[in-house]
Amino acid sequence: MRIDVVSIFPDYLAPLELSLVGKARREGILDLQVHDLRAWTTDRHRTVDDTPFGGGAGMVMRPDVWGTALDHLLEPSTSSAAPGATTLLIPTPSGAPLTQQDAEELAGRERLIIACGRYEGIDARVAEHYAQRPEVTVREFSLGDYVLNGGEVAALVLVEAVARLLPGVVGNPASLVEESHSTAPGGGLLEYPVYTKPATWRGLAAPDVLLSGHHGKVARWRRDQALRRTAQRRPDLIAGLDQATLDEADRAVLTESGWSGGRHGAVGETTGEGGGPP
Ligand code: JD8
């Protein structure tokens, strides 16, 4: 996979030289290129912004500079990606929240370009223009409902969330299946709590079942913890679960957590006020 990140603060992406992503780059699994947007300015002040049409505070990033940069990166000479195999990702607080499903879909793409905005954002015509270009798909995404100063943090998150799904990046691919938010069958729950040595720490003991060596009981305990945690912390995920993935034991845990099979036997119905355990 090839990923290009464009920013006026390219050093912000330096952490992507570290850890698993850095290793994936050195091993050639991931071709990640970071670019300074100012490289495509034409004036002596290397201007990338101007005052907002319609007035208001702050500055807006110019479409023409972004156009020159993105046109260059989309030129066939710049990347071997097949036409149409490129996704242009634009982080913005007004975007759709990024999900694990998005990360899994993007991990199957040949090429990503991430346009990191600053100031009040990028002129809206950039996304509009490239959405009309057949060789690229445009996706505006957000990290979540809080405001950052720019798109670089979102680019760091996206690159890590996608790169770790590439074959050969994470040592044990099986671990990817069990993770929170995994879209794999049986997934969609938050992770169970994890423990390691010492067995007792500051008066707190690791759960006996985990030291029992009884794999069946360990698996059941972990499933119960994941169901209970999800019901308590992310009831929206329980509502989104495929019922067919729940067995009687699962239902019992959900009922005990305040979720009942209800009239319709539908997951997501609660017996308590306010939807979910006290
Ligand atoms: C891109 C400029 C700053 C945003 C005026 C503060 C994502 N979840 C998220 N929160 N914030 C962003 C984000 C913020 C950005 C840019 C993404 C480009 N800013 C602007 C509008 C209000 N300043 C984000 N993904």
Image (cartoon, rainbow, N blue to C red):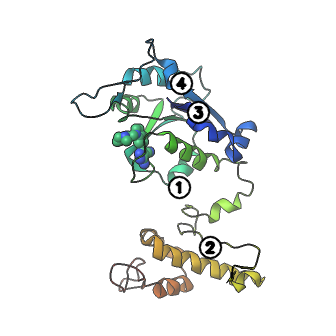
Compared with 154, 215 (above or below) is below
Confirm or deny contact between disc 3 and disc 2 (CB under 8 A). no
Res. 28 in view: no
Q: Residue at x 47, y 32 (%)?
A: 136
Tag 4's secondary structure?
A: helix
* Residue named by callout 3: 11
- Which one is in front, 148 or 238? 148
Q: Quadrant of residue 176?
A: bottom right
Q: Nearer the viewer, mark 4 or mark 2?
A: 2
N-term-proximal mark, 3 vs 2: 3
N-term-proximal mark, 4 vs 2: 4
Ligand 1 falls in quadrant: top left
Q: Residue at x 74, y 37 (%)?
A: 26
- Amino acid under disc 2: Pro
Q: Gap between marks 3 and 2, in whole Å? A: 35 Å
Compared with 50, 198 (above or below) is below
Q: Residue at x 60, y 77 (%)?
A: 223
Tag 1's secondary structure?
A: helix
Confirm or deny contact between disc 1 and disc 2 (CB under 8 A). no
Confirm or deny contact between disc 4 and disc 2 (CB under 8 A). no
Report x, y in % for residue 228: 52, 79
Left or right of residue 132, residue 8 in this image: right
N-term-proximal mark, 1 vs 3: 3
Q: Gap between marks 4 and 2, in whole Å? A: 44 Å
- Amino acid under disc 3: Asp
Q: Report whether the residue tagged 2 is closer than 8 Å to ligand 1.
A: no
* Residue named by callout 2: 193
Q: Gap between marks 3 and 4, in whole Å? A: 19 Å
